Amino acid sequence: MLKTSEPARTDAVVVDGLRKTFTLRHTHSFKETFLAALRRKPLTTQFQALEGVSFSIKQGESVALLGYNGSGKSTMLKLISGVLSPDEGKVLTRGRVAGLIEVGAGFHPDLSGRENVYLNAAILGMSKKETDALFDDIVAFSEIEAFIDTEVKHYSSGMFLRLAFSVAIHTEVDILLIDEILAVGDEPFQQKCLARIRGLHDAGKTLVVVSHDLDMVSNLCQRGVLLRGGSIAFDGDSKEAVAMMRAG
Amino acid sequence: MTTETTSVPALRAPGAGLGLLDVFRRRHLLALLVRKEVQIRYRGSILGWLWSYVKPLTQFAVFFVALGIVLRQGETIGYYALYLLSGMMIVTFFTEAFQNGTRSIIDNSALIKKIFIPRELFPVASTLVAVVNTLPQVVVVFVIALISGWQFSLGAVAAILLSLLIITVFATGLGMLFGAVNVAFRDAQSFVEIIGMCAVWASPVLYQWHLVADRVGEGALFTLYSINPITAAVELSHAGFWMPLHPKNGLVLPNLVPASLAGLAIAFATLLLGQFVFRRLEGRFAQDL
């Protein structure tokens, strides 16, 4: 599944001199803010999530973001998806970006499976026409045909995840961001998802993957970017990156 | 290979959008969000959507009995029930849209923290939910007016539409403004409830405008009172539903046309201010929620 690099592939993601600081606010009302200011207590504390991070991802590449908890991988993914904005430096993307970040975030328990498919597809940027065309595929992939008109709150957690994942994996995208979703669902479904993700990659989509399943990501991705304490410790072959991460 | 074909889209910063303009580009999603809200709001209650009419109707009954009968406003103001209804409908629409808009960002925090979509969608959807809720009330008031002898005129219809437009724009702007502030300071939503409480008294809904003019004169204070966009919208609603019946003491705000235009201008200015503040604060939504 390694692909020979074609000449002059364009950048799909460019990250340049990125810094992201979280300001943790300790007060949540005017009164608290006022009292804390009076007592000269700190209103906020700063937490540096990413510092001086630069890299670029070519179109059609598959990249694993590696690192332990708190290393800044998920923050990086949120910056690429546009949920967070950088404090310094820049993030640029080309084409449609969709995240399999916490699939099912847009699901509402009181709506039926069908309504949720349409709502979530629209959240991920699909038009009604595109959703209509893909609807049967989405339902077939999730294997819950019989329950598609049942309210989602009656679903088992596995059914819920299968449907949510199925919607996300069918969206028309150029760059797919994947955060720790393959840890859920049963084995056959996981294999099916992985096959689907490989298929998307073979079709030329760009993948950015975050997962703690190191063997899986190093197989899925050719390239690994190892983050440590908010900056890049290694950028290169994914197997080497994993080895380096394990070495500490 | 599908990527290396003809057109390559440009590199751009994710999450940087055109604000309200993007909302109209994502109409399909907006429609689904509104439908979702409408569907789930009263799920699991026996009366369902009727609840959103029970509250204004109760309020109406209380005011009608207390002010119309006990305090005898009904004797001075002709068709007092219609006068009350057409004004209260506008204020109810305003407070509902405004309060929903203020809570909209917090209520959708799960989504905002995880997926990027233009966040203006949420306050705009809140206003549209209030519109969906208000339209049947408009029909009810219209039917009552028809039974009382309302006659079609272009001016009356234009006044009603302008009234609804002013509130839609004004409430959306305020919803964005307070919705954005509410992320960092939850005080905003309590503050907005108080504004909602005052709104019904700050406009000629229960009484006629000239009682205010008699007290404060027609000077600066009265100008301030009459350029309140809610006052303009309420009076436009009176002009549309109530005035065509030629009621006893049938008076609307003098200079209603300039007052309405001023109200509309203020509503749009509020929308721009709301959008401006929203954009300034939006970068922090995902981390503050």
Image (cartoon, coloured by chain):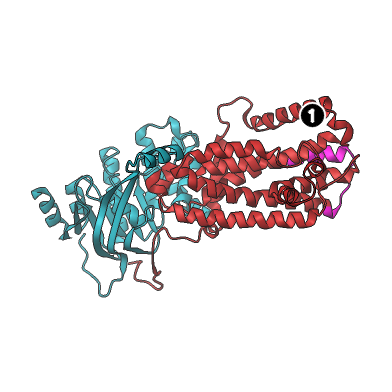
Chain colours: A cyan, B red
Residue B174 screen position, x and y as percent: 58, 48
Magenta-drawn stretch contains B274:
no
Q: What type of secondary structure mainly makes up the magenta span?
A: helix
| Residue at the spot 82% in from the left edge and 42% down from the top edge | B214
Q: Quadrant of residue B245?
A: top right
- The residue type indicated by label 1 comes to Leu
| Residue at the spot 33% in from the left edge and 48% down from the top edge | A23
Residue B81 to residue B6: above or below: above
Q: Is residue B233 left or right of residue A113?
A: right
Residue beneath disc 1 = B67
Residue B219 screen position, x and y as percent: 77, 51
Instruction: Examine the rendering and report whether any part of residue A228 can be seen.
Output: yes
Residue B166 screen position, x and y as percent: 69, 51
Is disc 1 placed on a helix, strand or loop?
helix
| Residue at the spot 65% in from the left edge and 43% down from the top edge | B94
Residue B151 screen position, x and y as percent: 89, 47
Specify the subunit that label 1 lies on. B
Residue B255 to residue B75: above or below: below
Instruction: Examine the rendering and report whether any part of residue A125 can be seen.
Output: no
Report the quarter where the C terminus of chain B lies. Answer: top left
Label 1 neighbour load within 10 Å: few <14, some 14-19, many 20+: some
Residue A131 to residue B89: above or below: below
In depth, the one of B199 and B30 nearer the eye is B199
Q: Is residue B223 left or right of residue A113?
A: right
In depth, the one of B289 and A10 nearer the eye is B289
Q: Quadrant of residue B70?
A: top right
What span is colored magenta in the figure? B135-155
Q: Is residue A54 left or right of residue B138?
A: left
In depth, the one of A145 and A246 nearer the eye is A246
Magenta-drawn stretch contains B136:
yes
Report the quarter where the N terminus of chain B lies. Answer: bottom left
